[in-house]
Amino acid sequence: MTVVGQISDFELKLLKVFRTVVACGGFAAAEVALGISRAAISMQMSDLEKRLGVKLCQRGRAGFSLTDEGKRVLEASDRLFGAVEHFRSELNELHQHLQGTLVIGITDNLVSHPGMKITHGLAALKARGPGVHINLRMQPSDDIEMGVLDGRLNVGVIPRVRDLPGLNYSPLYEEKTRLYCADTHPLFTDTSADITGYEVVQPRFKQPAEAATLYARHTVGAHANDREGILFLVLTGCYLGYLPDHYATPWVKAGRLKPLQPGFTTHFCVITARSRRTNLVTETFLETL
């Protein structure tokens, strides 16, 4: 193995890609977690192998597997990244009160959910550590998964649609979703009409498996990247849309929306990285939840 005098930021980035590939069980599964193509992952893995002077893994029809050298590099990287996190934790513990930063990623439109515990958890964290800095990022769930895996996020809150092998999942609460129409839509007054004859807004973000069955019953007339986009399109009166009950409630009370039929249940959870030791700030926040 080539002796390296120092590890550059770029080599640390390549090691994070390697660790994500291992955590996901292969290049294909890592595409979503890393947000880059399989070809780009392959190039970065090859670059890392050249820099280290060893072959890290076998990939092909037989599947993905680590070489003996790859296993040793993975173990060494565990110690490397663990040491960094341990250093951060030690700095926190030097003080009598919590200090540091909590970087948390959350999907959109959760604040109106009556069972939402994030606000209370953050308030409790600040009460125990007034000096803690909170960095909250509103992001799509795919970006949150990737951020937690590569260390840019300490913790994430996402719908549990799939499980990645490199993440820990802790249940948080459930969210009920129903089909809605606006007050200018024909179904607002004509409840006898066939619902499947009207266009629906389909989201471009991941949904529970049962949602696919419901969308298959409709004609998709529009797409939206988030739930606010769905609401915008539903309020035109041209489309139906599946919205969380807690998000739609103010519009229902104002007479602008009407629920038509049940939809599906989404389970939200807190995610952390399995291979990374949580620091004291993150541990305290998780305790509050």
Image (cartoon, rainbow, N blue to C red):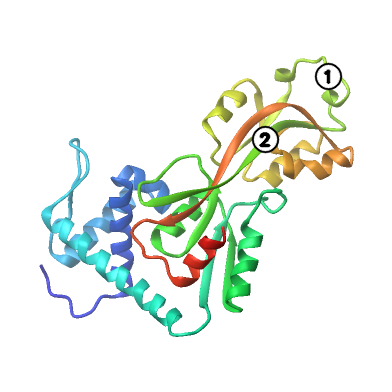
Name the residue: 73% across, 22% down: 198
Please tell me in which quadrant of the rendered image residue 241 appears: top right
Q: Quadrant of the N terminus?
A: bottom left
Name the residue: 46% across, 59% down: 147
Q: Can you see residue 182?
A: yes
* Residue furthest out toward the bottom: 95
Residue 39 screen position, x and y as percent: 31, 48
Label 1 element class: loop
Name the residue: 33% across, 59% down: 275
**Along the line of sight, which residue is nearer the eye, 208 or 2?**
208
Please tell me in which quadrant of the rendered image residue 134 appears: bottom right
Residue 107 screen position, x and y as percent: 59, 52
**Position of 239 compared to 225: left or right?**
right
**Position of 65 compared to 12: left or right?**
left
Residue at numbered disc 2: 177
**Along the line of sight, which residue is nearer the eye, 201 or 212?**
212
**Position of 196 compared to 256: left or right?**
left
Q: Can you see residue 204?
A: no
Q: Quadrant of the C terminus?
A: bottom right
- Between circles 1 and 2, the one closer to the viewer is 2
The first of marks 1 and 2 along the sequence is 2
CA distance for labels 1 and 2 = 19 Å
> Which amino acid is tagged 1?
Thr
Number of residues whose C-alpha sits closer than 10 Å to that of mark 2, classed few (under 14), some (14–19) or many (20 or more): many
Residue at numbered disc 1: 191
Number of residues whose C-alpha sits closer than 10 Å to that of mark 1, classed few (under 14), some (14–19) or many (20 or more): few
> Which amino acid is tagged 2?
Thr
Q: Which mark is residue 108?
A: none
**Position of 127 compared to 79: left or right?**
right
Figure check: 278 above or below 64:
below
**Along the line of sight, which residue is nearer the eye, 127 or 136?**
127
